[in-house]
Image (spheres, grey):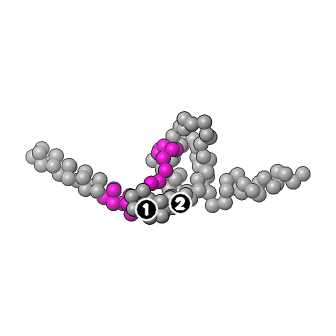
Amino acid sequence: MTRRRDKKRFQGRNGIPTGAVAADTSKQVPNNSYDPPPNWYIDKPFTCCECGREDVWTAQQQKWYYEVAKGSLFATATHCRECRNRIRDARDEQRKKSEAGRSKAND
Ligand SMILES: [Zn+2]
């Protein structure tokens, strides 16, 4: 009987593909679809929707996004690192401006 051993070899350690990061499904946001939640993450190449640059959403980033930031399981990366930084900087700038305006009004 070698069937069990063969299966193990195909799936790798802990039943996840080589290079994938194991997911903690108990930390994921509940998923309302019929598909089971992913129990592992793997690097996912994507094209930035803003500048068209190719980037990779790494397995570690996905784990953080779904389990720590509690992002939706339907969400996926759409912006490359540079565009994300630019968007974040613009948002910070906006916040600083509105905070400055508010403290001025309180004086
Ligand atoms: Zn971009």
* Residue 104 image offset from top left, x and y in percent: 12, 49
* Residue 89 image offset from top left, x and y in percent: 30, 58
Question: Contact (CB < 8 A) between labels 1 and 2?
Answer: no
Residue receiving disc 2: 45
Residue 36: quarter of image: top right
Q: Is residue 16 left or right of residue 73?
A: right
* Residue 31 image offset from top left, x and y in percent: 54, 38
Q: Determine crowd level at label 1: few under 14, some 14-19, many 20+ residues with C-alpha closer than 10 A.
A: few
Whichever of labels 1 and 2 marks the residue nearer the N terminus, that label is 2
From mark 1 to mark 2, how far is it between C-alphas?
12 Å
Residue reaching furthest to the left: 107
Residue 21 shown in magenta: no
Residue at x-position 53% and y-position 52%: 63
Disc 1 under 8 Å from ligand 1? The reply is: yes
Amino acid found under the numbered disc labelled 1? Gly
Q: Which mark is residue 52?
A: 1
Residue at x-position 51% and y-position 40%: 29
For the magenta stretch, what is the residue range? 70-89
Which circle, 1 or 2, is nearer the viewer?
Answer: 1
Residue at x-position 59% and y-position 49%: 23
Q: Secondary structure at mark 2?
A: strand
Amino acid found under the numbered disc labelled 2? Pro
Q: Secondary structure at mark 1?
A: loop
Would you say residue 68 is visible in this rendering? no
